Image (cartoon, grey):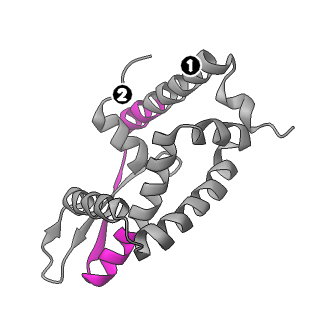
């Protein structure tokens, strides 16, 4: 099992292996100038951090953040199973990251609407070699997760999805 590169991690999210395509999205303003997603994300992270650190009640820290927390804790078990969700949510870092990601998604969507940005998707076919690389990286990621569960609990994540 090898370490995944940043490109392989990115490809895990952009490649659709069943359709043998890669989908990359970008943002454009009304003048068709590209807005970098990384820049928007940096601004959102700073904004969210500022809002959550406020002691006064704001819409973000008193309404949206708790709503996103309830959404995430309801949604994640449906994808990974109750046992895995319970284990993952015990980590404050993981729980906070997921809830903040959900909040960031809401604010990202609002930002796109408010700035009247266009989402432009580029769909490109992938070669057999690229598909094999994606499968290999995906298998490596699954093995890392299984190994982590084995190290902690003595069994793999696949045991988690069986209802008891």
Q: Quadrant of residue 2?
A: top left
User: Can you name the residue that lies furthest to the right here?
Assistant: 164
Q: Is residue 5 magenta?
A: no
Residue range highlighted in magenta: 107-135
Whether residue 76 is visible: yes
Q: What quarter of the picture does the C terminus occupy?
A: top right
In this view, 54 is above or below 88: below
How crowded pointer 1 is (Cα within 10 Å; few <14, some 14-19, many 20+) is rated as some
Q: Name the foreground residue: 65 vs 21.
A: 65
The spot of residue 149 in percent (x, y) is 61, 23
Residue ID for mark 2: 4
The spot of residue 106 in percent (x, y) is 43, 69
Q: Quadrant of residue 110?
A: bottom left
Q: What quarter of the picture does the N terminus occupy?
A: top left
Residue ID for mark 1: 147
Image marks 2 and 1: residues in contact by CB distance under 8 Å: no
């Amino acid at each position: 099992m090898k370490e995944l590169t940043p490109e392989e991690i990115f490809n895990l999210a952009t490649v659709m292996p069943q359709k043998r395509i890669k989908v990359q999205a970008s943002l454009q303003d009304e003048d068709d100038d590209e807005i970098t997603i990384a820049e928007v994300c940096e601004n959102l992270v700073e904004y969210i951090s500022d809002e959550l650190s406020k002691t006064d009640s704001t819409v973000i820290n008193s309404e949206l953040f708790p709503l996103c927390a309830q959404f995430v804790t309801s949604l994640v078990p449906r994808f990974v199973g109750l046992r895995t969700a319970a284990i993952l949510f015990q980590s404050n870092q993981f729980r906070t990251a997921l809830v903040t990601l959900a909040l960031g998604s809401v604010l990202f969507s609002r930002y796109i609407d408010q700035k009247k940005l266009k989402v432009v998707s580029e769909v490109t076919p992938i070669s057999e070699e690229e598909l094999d690389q994606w499968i290999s990286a995906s298998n490596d990621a699954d093995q890392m997760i299984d190994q982590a569960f084995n190290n902690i609990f003595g069994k793999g994540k696949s045991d988690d999805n069986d209802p008891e």
